[in-house]
Image: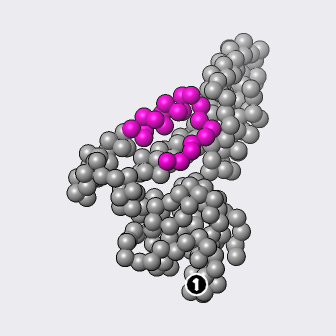
Amino acid sequence: MNLEDLANKLVLERESDRLQPLDDSFYEQAAAYVKRLDQARKEAADYKEAGMIDDEIKNARILIEGVFDRRMSKIIQYAAIYAAGTRLSVEGLTAAEKAVFDGLVAALERGRAGILLPALDVSPKASDDALKVRLAKNILGGITTKEQPIESSAALSRDAGSMDADTELMTVKVLKDIPRFVGVDGRQYQLSGDDVVVLPKANALVLCNKNIAIPLHNP
């Protein structure tokens, strides 16, 4: 392992909203790398060489922490979505990160059961579908309702041209089933995994940021 390896890992993590492949032993390898540098600094022939090695150690620690922070931010986001009822397939976790993810999900689910559901006057034993509808606003940034007609993905694609000209649109592919929600255009949406739809850009970006959909192209 060297600085270039660490920098490449960080760039990959920053360029994607998804967790990138990472060896289970990554942090152990990183620790061994820093330890080797520290030993080399102690054995340096002069202050100049020691200073150069010291700079490499500092840069290595910055990169390692950057990779950790970026991956943890994604894991926290995944856990929040998962605990809200959207069972995403979370891939790319190391064994240690999987333990963190499971712990976060468990803590968030306890928090919802003990704090949110009593405030909503919802029994913890309420059906999953009912909870998903109530909590869709948290996931999608929209307001759920049962009174408005539901737009299917086919109808959405067909009617995209008739939307308000002021509404900026975005085409996305849906990765998972999504609870019913109302977009910023006032329409109600109910989407399934693998649907390709045109949505208001504000809602589409929320879905993409939550790793529930991926952008395709603007219509």
Residue 126, horizontal then vertical, whole percent: 30, 52
Q: Residue at x 57, y 81 (%)?
A: 167
Residue 73, horizontal then vertical, whole percent: 53, 45
Q: Residue at x 38, y 52 (%)?
A: 128
* SS of the residue under disc 1: loop
- Residue 129 or 113: which is nearer the viewer? 129
Q: Which residues are magenta?
A: 87-106
Q: Quadrant of residue 55?
A: top right
**Residue 158 covered by magenta stretch:** no
Q: Quadrant of residue 4?
A: top right
Disc 1 marks which residue? 163
Image quadrant containing the N terminus: top right
* Residue 124 falls left or right of residue 40: left
Q: Is residue 19 above or below residue 135?
A: above
Q: Residue at x 70, y 17 (%)?
A: 36
The answer to whether any part of residue 126 appears in the image is: yes
Residue 93, horizontal then vertical, whole percent: 59, 35
Q: Residue at x 64, y 62 (%)?
A: 173
How crowded pointer 1 is (Cα within 10 Å; few <14, some 14-19, many 20+) is rated as some
- Residue 111 or 5: which is nearer the viewer? 111
* Residue 107 falls left or right of residue 190: left
Q: Main secondary structure of the magenta part?
A: helix
Image quadrant containing the C terminus: bottom right
Residue 16, horizontal then vertical, whole percent: 66, 50
**Residue 93 covered by magenta stretch:** yes
Query: Which amino acid type is shown beneath numbered disc 1?
Result: Met
- Residue 141 or 173: which is nearer the viewer? 173
Q: Is residue 2 above or below residue 110?
A: above
Q: Quadrant of residue 71?
A: top right
Visual colour scheme: one colour
